[in-house]
Image (cartoon, grey):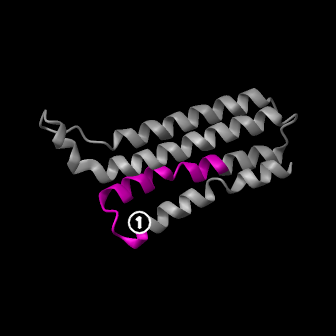
Amino acid sequence: MDKSRIAAFTDAVLAIILTIMILEFKTPDSFSIWAITGQLPYLISYAIGYLFIGTAWYNHHYMFAKTHRITKTVYWVNNFWMFSTSFIPVATAWVGRGSTSRGRKSFMVACSFYGPLPTCFYQRR
């Protein structure tokens, strides 16, 4: 399988994930800069999710640059990685609505843990 096609598909999926995350941000009715403070928990959650995805994207491209051949196993591990990363918008929106809940924080931590898990597999190949 062509490495560049998988990288392009992954780029598209991550761009969609980032777009979904920002669509959760609601435009305030007021023109005052202080009107955004009501959504501060979501903005913080969004920034953490964006940083996580940006770092994961960079690492993904770095590892694919070092890869000489794409096997079926690498292909499916990449799909699992994209699948687990696709839960980050859900976690971001959930934590942004109320960061005091233990379940919400646990879900965000789980998404942050399972997302990079396939990276360990890439490094072994």
- Disc 1 marks a residue whose amino acid type is Arg
Give the percent coordinates (x, y) of residue 42.
33, 50
| Residue in front for this viewpoint, 119 or 80 | 119
Give the percent coordinates (x, y) of residue 23.
35, 39
Give the percent coordinates (x, y) of residue 108.
48, 60
Range of the magenta residues? 81-104
Relative horizontal placement of residue 42, taking residue 30 as reference (left or right): right
Q: Residues within 10 Å of mark 1 (few under 14, many from 20)?
A: many
Is 98 within the magenta?
A: yes
Taking the view exactly as shown, the residue that stands out farthest to the front is 34
Q: Which residue is mark 1?
A: 104
- Does dot 1 land on a helix, a strand or a loop? helix
Q: Residue visible at 51% across and 53% down? A: 87
Name which quarter of the figure residue 53 lies in: top right
Q: Residue visible at 76% across and 54% down? A: 120
Q: Residue visible at 54% across and 47% down? A: 52
Name which quarter of the figure residue 59 lies in: top right
Give the percent coordinates (x, y) of residue 113.
60, 60
Relative horizontal placement of residue 102, taking residue 63 as reference (left or right): left
